[in-house]
Image: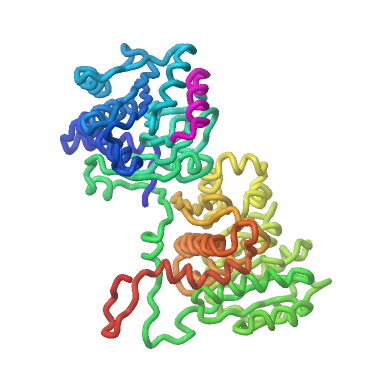
Amino acid sequence: MRLVTAAEMGRLDARATEEYGIPSLILMENAGIQVAREVSRLLAGNIDGKRVLILCGKGNNGGDGFVAARHLINNGAEVILFLLASERDIKGDALTNLTIYQRMGGKVYSFQDPKDLNALRLALLSASVVVDAIYGTGFRGDVPELIAKAMTMINESDLPVLAVDLPSGLEADTGKIPSACLQAKVTVTLGLPKVGLVVEPGASAAGEVVVVDISIPGEMIANTRISRALLTGELCRNWLKRRPAMAHKGHFGHLLFAGGQTGMAGAAVLAVSGALRSGVGLVTAAVPESIYPLVVPQVPEAMTWPLPAVDGALTGDSLREKDCSPFSAAVIGPGMGRRPESADFLLALLEAMKGPVVLDADALFAMAGHIELLAAAQGPVILTPHPGEMARLTGLSTAEVEKDRLEVATRYAKEWGCVMVLKGSRTVIATPEGGLYINSTGNPGMATGGSGDVLAGVIGALAAQGVDAVHAAALGVYVHGLAGDLAARRYGQGAMKAGDIVDFLPEGWTQLDQAAMNLDGKQVAL
């Protein structure tokens, strides 16, 4: 599902009018009709006699609210409409629809003075639902104090809020909430979803996001270059590789895992286990001799390279006389350690590998201050930092990374020529070309030691099978999050551990692949 900024959506609206001759008044009419329908759905189809409180601003978002108001009246609802602006400030299509609403007998209550808070408080006592049509995609900055007080009152009322396009107080392009914001149960977003609806804290404020058609031509949308997308099962399913009936293990790649040290054998086990549950044909675990006896019993399906190490950690000499040419991809870093020699080991492996490389955990630590190491890579590089690791790599603070996750990931993916997986709530995958994917799966229960090791193994397995680096990263993130959601459903978020994510990867892959082969080889939907 593609995601747009406010400017991109504005251009699509304008083109619909200028190139296809669809009047902007029709677009507003369709938006209001869809909002009215979703109000009815929210009230289980029973709106006759129900009181609907609608708050309208002065712009087109308010205009959508005026349209919704008259359609709700026509369907038997009682509408209480507050205008959070002066009527003389209403212009264009919004004014046309306000005039129609008033000629139908619809009442407008002014909300411009602190004393109007009492009227709003009384309206909330009798309303069944609140429609938020205050601010649209053009909102930036702080909410005025009086409107902020109204928002607080509404949020504390526990009434369901239906937001038009996006919750008021939320910035459409960033998901930021600079001051006050309405907390929606449902957000009816028009045409295409906005970026701010799928990243935190915007995603939490938006509730259920319903994307509705307002008659913008699908052909125009399809032919418009939009560089951001939300990772969904429908999208990710396109990147799955079907397994030929006559296949053997050599068809599905050979992944090299390199990492682990004394005291960190579990990181190696989790990464290799994630890979083995993600379709790769062969895995070789290159680990220090000191932990070799601990790793082998836990992942008997993997081959192993016991490597010489110094004080239990890998060094630049650990790979001497080892041939990396058989490997189609590599995962480097989980549990590798943070000794100065780790950078030498990373460099040696980057120079030896010809295929894609996933750099995670301690490999990212070794890279900090040494980004030039990336130049040694002969194939695509996928970096998988959490915000703290990203801060160390870039010289930013963790707070600065978290404040502008999309911008930071996009900037450094382009600057360093790599695929960037910036982990966290709504993990972001940025491409060297400036593309961006935002994940829709996962939960706070996955914030547990070893979860990232599993993800590195999953992504590496996909890259080893020939999935291109961008799609391997995006698909791996999606299924890893889906497995985490399944584990949380079984154990609860507080009781989850990283191994549970591994255990639920098979069900995650099964859910993603909603096609099965019947006896005559035709694909049928399950």
Check the image and name the residue furthest to the right. 311
> Is residue 360 located in the magenta-colored stretch of the structure?
no
Horizontal side, residue 486 vs residue 304: left or right: left
Residues shaded magenta = 144-159
Q: Nearer the viewer, residue 357 or 33?
A: 33
Q: Can you give x and y, in whole percent of width and height, for residue 307 in the image?
A: 73, 79
For the C terminus, the image quarter is bottom left
Residue drawn at 69 percent across, 82 percent down: 296
Give the residue at x 36% y 69%: 514
Q: Give the left or right position of residue 311, taking residue 179 as reference.
A: right
Q: Is residue 215 left or right of residue 149?
A: left
Q: Is residue 269 visible?
A: yes
The answer to whether residue 74 is above or below residue 95 is below
232 or 390, which lies in front?
Answer: 232
**Is 242 placed above or below 451 here?**
below
Where in the figure is residue 421, as x and y percent of width and height?
A: 55, 56
Q: Going 40% across and 41% down the picture, which residue do you hit?
A: 186
Residue 457 x/y as whole percent: 58, 69
Residue 155 magenta: yes
Residue 446 in picture, x, y percent from top left: 60, 58
Q: Residue furthest left?
A: 21
